[in-house]
Every structure is written in C-alpha cells, then in structure tokens.
Amino acid sequence: MNSPNFSLLSKEALKEFGALLLLDHLMQYELLQIEKQELEDIIEQLENSVAKLKKGFFRSDEHEQELTFEKEELKEAKNAISEVENEMDENQHCRLNIALLETDDEGLESLLNFMESRGTLTLDEENFYKVTDKGHKVYQDLVEQLEAYVTHFEVYAYVDLEQGIFGDPDTDLLEGEKWLDLRVAVAEYKGIDPFRVVFLAMLSAETFYENPDWKFDLSMGTLFQEVEQIVEEQLHVDDLSYEDSEGTFSGEEVIKNIIQQGAELVAKRKKKEKGINHRKNLEESPNEQVIKTTYYL
C-alpha cells in the first residue's frame, strides 16, 4: 500500500490534543458538580413551594393535589442528587490537585501550566485544578466537534467496497477483513486533518482512558503514537483507485461516491431514529467544518 507521506504530529498538535484530553477528563467531575448545583437550586425551590402549600388548615382538593405533586417532585430531586453525589465519589479520580503533581501526576505539570497560561484552567481554594469559563467554552466546542465527527465520519468506519455497503453496528457482525475503515481517506478528501479525526474517534470511544497508564504516557509524549500509527496505516484516497473491464477509476472518484452514499445513509438513519423529514434532518446536522477548528494553537 502506497500512502501519502503524512508528517507526524507537531509539538503544538501534541500539546493541543493533550490539553483537550485533560480538559475532557476534568469535565467528567465538573459536569457532575454543575448538575448537583442545579439540583440543589431545584430542591430549594420545591422546599419553599411545599412549605407555602402546607400553610393553612383548610385546603381544597386541587390544593392537596398540587401539594402531593410538589412532594413527589421534591422526593425525585433528592433521589437524583443522591445519585449524582455517588457519581462524584466514583469520579474523584478525575480531579487533579497541585500537590499530587509531585507524586503520581508529576509529568502533567507542564501541560497543566500551559492550560493555565491559555486561561482554560485555574486553581480553586483547595488547590484543585478547576475549569474556567473559557475552559467551559473550549469544552463545548470540543463536544460540537465530537458530534460532528459522529455525524459525518463514523459511518465510514466499516465499509465493504466489494459489495458497496456500510456496516451497521446494530445488525452486522463487524469482524473480518471485508470491512475497511475509510475515515482517514474521507478526511483527506474533505481537507480535514486526519489526525484530528482519529483523535476525535478515540476520544468519542473513550479509547485513551482504557489505558490505565494514560496519564503517564501523556506526560512522556507517547500517548498519541497510536493516532499517528492509525493515520499512517489506514487507507488513503490514492489507495482506492482501481481498474476493471469498464475502465480505470481514480481514488478521488471512488471516495467521492462513497461519501455521497454515506451522507445519504446517515440521513436515512437519522430520519428513522427521530421520525422527522429528510430535509429537516440535514438542516439539523452539525457542521463538519467545526472539526477544522483548533483551540490551543
């Protein structure tokens, strides 16, 4: 297989991907904090409402029904906040304290300092790293990139070129050599950084976190070697050219046709899932161009 000569990730790209991964890691705890605060506000409002409804000796049936409803809502909110607090306990490992940098996470200090210098992290009163408002904006942009990736690229992860079909994770056994991953080729044709697409794919699947030593590998600069390897080894546009009795077809012609079929399939699947019309589905699809955006470079 003759693939284009892709450069390895630059130091700037490695730093950006590392910062985004750490941001995603920290947000797993901070999102729970936000949810807890929202539930606390709801509980306070419901408690005030219940207290008001309890006043007085003579209450109408309608009044009693409203009181019962508010009590049930309060009970559900308290159960919800209890579940969130349990999740927070389970996700304590997603917090980073500056004191720990001298032990387990020492190698992450330069990357965390970089994030501080860019205004996406700060230290709270307990010396835990906390995501700033700017950091929340960067995270929201990252979420949009992930949504765009899922919408526009995930369908090309399993393609059978011989039969001209796309694998369906819900119905197909996605094993065997017939399934080819064309996400890098699609990114290359669309002018989107294939390294970023692979990074988003692995982040979406939480692949990085499957490695128990991911923080150490990140600090050593080796965590994203798999990203580089995937980009180099996967099929590229030129690899898709072929010749048969009908003539010679370039890789550009093949991938263009595949992208068109893939887009139509995505629209059909969304229409089936959401039960809305085809045109509206396309209008609501996240713009894939957001994938080109960088936030730390």
Image: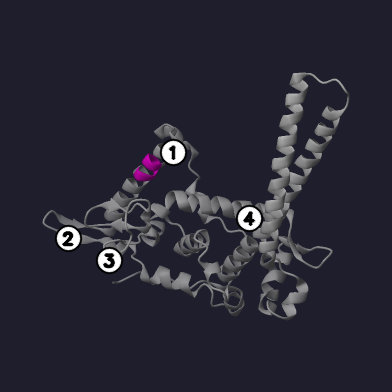
Q: Secondary structure at mark 1?
A: helix
Please say which color scheme the image uses.
one colour
Mark linked to residue 139: 4
Label annotation for residue 177: 3
Residue drawn at (72%, 70%), measured in percent from left and top? Answer: 113
Q: Upstream in the sequence, badge 3 or badge 1?
A: 3
Say the numbered circle drawn on residue 282.
1
Q: CA distance from mark 3 to mark 4?
A: 36 Å
Among numbered discs 1 and 2, the one appearing first in the sequence? 2
Mark 2, residue position: 243
Three-letter code for the amino acid on which mark 4 is drawn:
Tyr
Q: Using a 10 Å C-alpha cutoff, classify the residue at mark 1 as few (fewer than 14 neighbours), some (14 to 19) or many (20 or more).
A: some
**What distance separates the C-alpha of mark 4 from that of mark 1?**
25 Å
Give the magenta-colored segment's residue range: 265-269
Mark before the other along the chain sequence, 4 or 1: 4
Between 19 and 252, the residue placed more toward the observer is 19
